[in-house]
Amino acid sequence: MRSEADWRALAEKALAGAGFDTLTAHTDDGIAYGPLYPRRTPATPIATRAAGWMIAQRLDDPDPARAAAQALVDLEAGAEALALCFEGAGAARGFGLPATEEALAAVLHGVMLDIVHLRIEPHPQGAALVAALTKLAAGQGLAPAALSLDAGIDAIGPLAFAGRFPDDDVKLRAECGALAVSRAAEGFAGRMVEADGRIYHDAGASEAQELGATLATAVYHLRALADAGMPVAHAADAIGFTLAADQQQFLVTAKLRALRLLWRRVLQLSGLASPAPTRLHVETSYRMMAARDPHANILRTTIAAFAAATGGADSLSVLPFTAANGLPEERARRLARNTQLILREESGLGRVADPAAGSGGIEALTDAMAEAGWREFRQIEAEGGIFQSLKAGRLQARIAATRRARDAEIAAGRRPIIGVTLYPLGDERAPPVLIARDETRETGETPTEGTSLKAHRLAEEAEAAA
């Protein structure tokens, strides 16, 4: 059996004079990770999903009739959940279902609500959308307890996205807590509240910044629910998490595993000796999608989905490969759906609860990422919590600095983008989409750069498409 020294000697021989340290990479947070680690048994196993993950498909078409047809096709072809993304949501990215009761009824016409998991992406009018869904279910003779629903109540995400904050968050937090408690009293059994990291990821955040902001948002909601009278154990179980998965396979796997460690630590400090498992939804990164040579996005989303699966995602949405070009049509949606089906059913990734357990490299990276995420979380808490940090523009400033540093590496050629900065196609045709992406769809009243994560994200999109 070869020793670590044996493997190192073989690697140095293959490097032909280059130093072994040239194989060490660094994350945006400065975490160094190398090519060689001994196998390691974690001191505390990471509790992940029992088996498999739920295949979710986004619905974000502004045409309710077309979205309804998409929903039925998705469910008949293997999707088990529908992620309802309404216009005005941070995750809508220029499109989205009309945020009306009539549109919701049209979109879900023909869908058996008691056998499909539904997810409402966080939205400023989320309470009204949940109420409309409750009414629609009642029309099918279904009580709220019969629904499998993540309600997506989020007091922070829409504010962070828009960059507009109330003078004080006392009323905001009280309303958030009261709403979640009332929904739980009605019988809803899913996650009422969501801590969404995609907003920060889309704006350019590093892994630790995304983790820290997501954790701080969850803590904000935990306090809101506790203040509203919900026991801490029930409040913890009512909170769901959403993270983004890009093509950095090892980093994504470690990031997802690190979130579970971080949330478990928060709950232990809150007095819960045996907290409920973390409920984690993952969507493949919109930030990594390129408008140029979009077929390369199929490779990116496949790697991202693999990383999300090995990282322990409970549910997963894969963005269609033409998402950066416009509203995806059926072929792109089918490829996104089938990516998950192949990974789960044919590759068997869902048969192991934590595939990365015991890998020395992944375990070390998970620990380092958890430590970096905890430092970011503590920094946000020292700034008064997520609301005050965002209102003062402090978190946004750190994310903007990370994005500028990444942009500089791209511009210098140190971080190539296949099909964009490396091996670009000389002559390519635009892929078919239902509606071509037009940046004016996402403009309107432009928030200030200092407090809006939307402004940062639009800059990121423009650079990716350039």
Image (cartoon, rainbow, N blue to C red):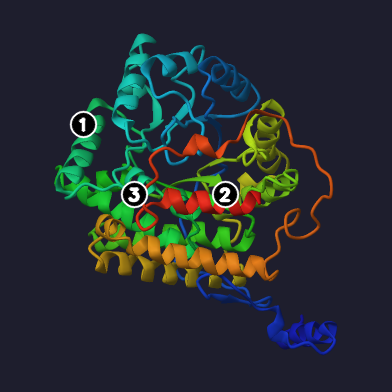
Q: Which of 395 and 212 is in front in this view?
A: 395
Picture quarter with the N terminus:
bottom right
Q: Count the numbered circles shown.
A: 3
Q: Position of residue 11 (x, y in %)?
A: 79, 82
The residue beneath circle 1 is 182
Q: Which residue is rendered at x = 38% and y = 38% of the image?
A: 122
First reached walking from the N terminus: tag 1 or tag 2:
1
Is residue 462 visible from the viewing direction of this image?
yes
Q: Which residue is rendered at x = 72% and y = 47% of the image?
A: 292
First reached walking from the N terminus: tag 1 or tag 3:
3
In the picture provided, is 101 more to the left or to the right than 419?
left
Q: Specify the label residue 461 is tagged with.
A: 2
Q: Which of marks 1 and 3 is in front?
A: 3
Q: Position of residue 175 (x, y in %)?
A: 19, 38
Confirm or deny contact between disc 1 and disc 2 (CB under 8 A): no
Tell me if residue 141 comes above or below residue 155 in the rendering.
Answer: above
Q: Which of marks 1 and 2 is in front?
A: 2
Label 2 SS? helix
The residue beneath circle 3 is 163
Which three-letter amino acid code belongs to the residue tagged 3? Gly
**Disc 2 versus disc 3: distance between alpha carbons?**
18 Å
